[in-house]
Amino acid sequence: MVGPRVKQYFISLGLKKTMIDQFLASYFIDAGYAGVELYKTPTGHRVVIYAEYPGRIIGRGGSVIRKLTAILQTRFGLENVSITVSPVTDPDLNARVVAYRIVRALEKEIPYRRVIMAMLKRIMDAGALGAEIVISGKLRGERATYEKLRTGKIYKAGEIVDYIVDRAVAKTLLKPGIYGVEVIIVKPSIPLPDQVEFKQLKPEEIQSLVQEYGAVEGSQQVAGAGNESG
């Protein structure tokens, strides 16, 4: 049985990770920030940051990393921080990276419909099974509304959502007001429960099965009936 001190430790570590994640997401939006992992080591804390452009987080000569290390130690109370910056393996399949791309495009006043269509195409070209993008705000007038476009197959409930669906939300402040962006990506994975594959046997495979297991019972009965009638 897990004691209360152990529970409190993991809860505090999770809350600290969430606060660091929110800080990094707002600070490194132009670097294509994708996520963070926080580990407790015997000598201190290890922070792994994932981004589309790792160089923008590292900085020239590691200047940004040094500042970030000081912030994590003083503001978030981490001890002996070791930071590792890793690139995202496939940014087009990372919902957070795509959401920040849309935010940056909206800040450049690119029409939102064009942005949605371009991002959906990039996501599907990367091999996703489905994608959904929602942009909300004052899109067409003074009243707030939303635009939702989807393609492919989208899963929003069930156990499969935990390991195949990536979801992210981002927001930005423009002249008309605050705009919100939600991105849902169904990543390529193992065969899904609702997907059935049919395999057609070759004639030699059928003949091999007949020789190994014998003729089907129904065919034997038909053959026997034909012999009796003869």
Image (cartoon, rainbow, N blue to C red):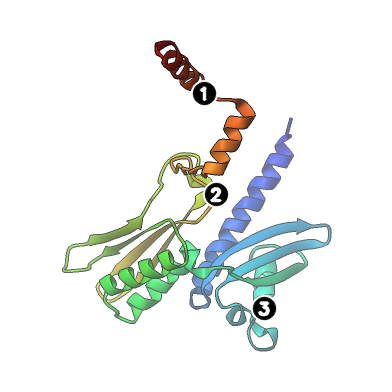
In front: label 1 or label 2: 1
Question: Disc 1 on helix, strand or loop?
Answer: loop
Residue at 32%, 67% in the rendered image: 179
Q: Nearer the viewer, residue 101 or 203?
A: 203
Q: Which amino acid does label 1 sit on?
A: Val
In front: label 2 or label 3: 2
47 left or right of 215?
A: right
Q: Position of residue 205 (x, y in %)?
A: 57, 41
Q: Position of residue 103 (x, y in %)?
A: 38, 72
Q: Which amino acid does label 2 sit on?
A: Ile
Which numbered circle lies on residue 65? 3
7 left or right of 23?
A: right
In front: label 1 or label 3: 1
Query: Image quadrant of residue 129?
Result: bottom left
What's the distance in space between the residues labelled 2 and 3, CA to CA? 38 Å
Q: Earlier in the sequence, mark 2 or mark 3?
A: 3
Q: Residues within 10 Å of mark 2 (few under 14, many from 20)?
A: few
Q: Which of marks 1 and 3 is nearer the N terminus?
A: 3
Q: Which of marks 1 and 2 is nearer the N terminus?
A: 2
Does the CB distance between marks 1 and 3 fall below 8 Å?
no
Which numbered circle lies on residue 216? 1
Q: Residues within 10 Å of mark 3 (few under 14, many from 20)?
A: some
Q: Nearer the viewer, residue 167 or 200?
A: 200
Judging by the rendered image, the residue that carries numbered circle 2 is 190
Quarter holding the C terminus is top left
